[in-house]
Image (cartoon, coloured by chain):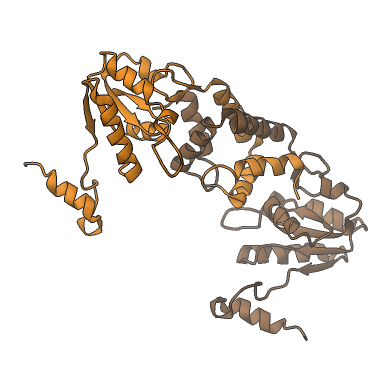
Chain colours: A brown, B orange
């Protein structure tokens, strides 16, 4: 079929989430036909980011600087810390452009099934941050899943001793959502948390 | 959000066929979390293939050597040339492990709509190969689309003067295909080309 190096590249790309052998082949062909304009820049970009990537010592974010740009941005509110499971969630909140505090990335979620215990997550550093006196409020932005919520409960207990205010994201009807298609739990939560107009 | 280099990498990956901004973000996060084991090897693999890739001077295949391994493989039948639109089709035929001849990659398909004319494709080299005396049979393996078939007709005319035998892929019921779901054209072709048992 194709040269050994091309085969190896297809196999590597097929490991990416959302790609399989077929889409990896299409991706490699796309690259091969755009050697100068795409493939060489892509190889360099991956290599450069891989060389530069660091885990932020303060919040656990992944970025090319350590501490990360969010932790060193003086225009952001250091008294507000939003706790997320994963860097993907941090990125999702940043895309809203509506949050100006800082973050804390747990690096996972408590899970008896997967054997993820509190000491496997970036929790001790969170408690230290909360106890440092510089933090006013911790927002627990876990997924609204059973494991996310039990992690949030565990963190609430751990943070209680620090005296810091602990909050969570609101539950309710998603913007653009149709009531008829919503699950009962969300609808009940939205009713309970109704707001005066 | 993320560092400028990470953003640029996401934008580059989002251009790959089958990926969009969302899956590109997931792919980059997958990489960032596997710096040593995945991201660095992937960057090197892309860079190495990009440096080494060539268009085969004989058949138009893309590979890390020129002429490509298929054209230089003495165990393959040089008298048999399979003409394909694209390298992806060559790879598809190679995966069947049932073809031992050589190839000729057109690099596209005649299309009045897209303004692709015969001189835009790798056709002159095909006629030269066929006229060289070394080729016994040319198999036209175009897609079974209108444009594929009109390209095949055009090539049949161009190759007529060389006296080489010209054939095309068989039409019929796909293996595992159910008659009830087949289009009428395929079923009619399969009936017409029925084989004695």
Above or below, A97 against A60 in this view is below
Above or below, B48 against A25 in this view is above
Name the quadrant of the C terminus of chain B: top left
Q: Position of residue B95 (x, y in %)?
A: 34, 33
Q: Is residue A90 left or right of residue B107?
A: right
Q: Is residue B36 left or right of residue B92?
A: right
In this view of the protein, which residue sits in the foreground, A134 or B151?
B151
Identify which residue is drawn at 22% across, 28% down.
B166
In this view of the protein, which residue sits in the foreground, B38 or B116?
B116
- Give the residue furthest to the bottom: A196
Q: Position of residue B124 (x, y in %)?
A: 37, 22
Residue A7 seen anywhere in this rendered image of the structure: yes
Above or below, B82 against A68 in this view is above
What is the total number of numbered labels drawn onto the structure image? 0
Identify which residue is drawn at 47% across, 42% down.
A23
Identify which residue is drawn at 52% across, 44% down.
B17
Tell me where residue A109 sits by quadrant. Answer: bottom right
In this view of the protein, which residue sits in the foreground, A180 or B84?
B84
Residue B33 seen anywhere in this rendered image of the structure: no
Tell me where residue A35 sits by quadrant. Answer: top right
Q: Position of residue B8 (x, y in %)?
A: 70, 41
Q: Position of residue A63 (x, y in %)?
A: 76, 42
């Amino acid at each position: 079929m194709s040269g050994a190096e091309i085969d190896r590249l297809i196999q590597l790309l097929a490991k990416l989430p959302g790609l399989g052998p077929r889409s990896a082949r299409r991706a490699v062909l796309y690259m091969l036909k755009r050697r100068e304009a795409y493939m060489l820049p892509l190889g360099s970009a991956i290599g450069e980011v891989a060389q530069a990537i660091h885990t932020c010592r303060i919040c656990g974010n992944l970025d090319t600087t350590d501490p990360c740009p969010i932790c060193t941005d003086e225009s952001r509110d250091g008294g507000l810390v939003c706790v997320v499971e994963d860097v993907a969630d941090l990125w999702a909140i940043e895309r809203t452009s509506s949050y100006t505090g800082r973050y804390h990335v747990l690096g996972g979620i408590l899970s008896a099934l997967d054997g993820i215990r509190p000491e496997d997550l970036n929790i001790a550093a969170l408690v230290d941050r909360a106890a440092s006196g510089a933090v006013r409020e911790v927002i627990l932005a876990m997924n609204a899943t059973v494991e996310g919520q039990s992690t949030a409960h565990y963190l609430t207990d751990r943070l209680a001793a620090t005296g810091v205010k602990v909050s969570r994201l609101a539950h309710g009807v998603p913007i653009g959502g149709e009531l008829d298609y919503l699950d009962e739990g969300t609808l009940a939560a939205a009713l309970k948390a109704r707001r005066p107009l």
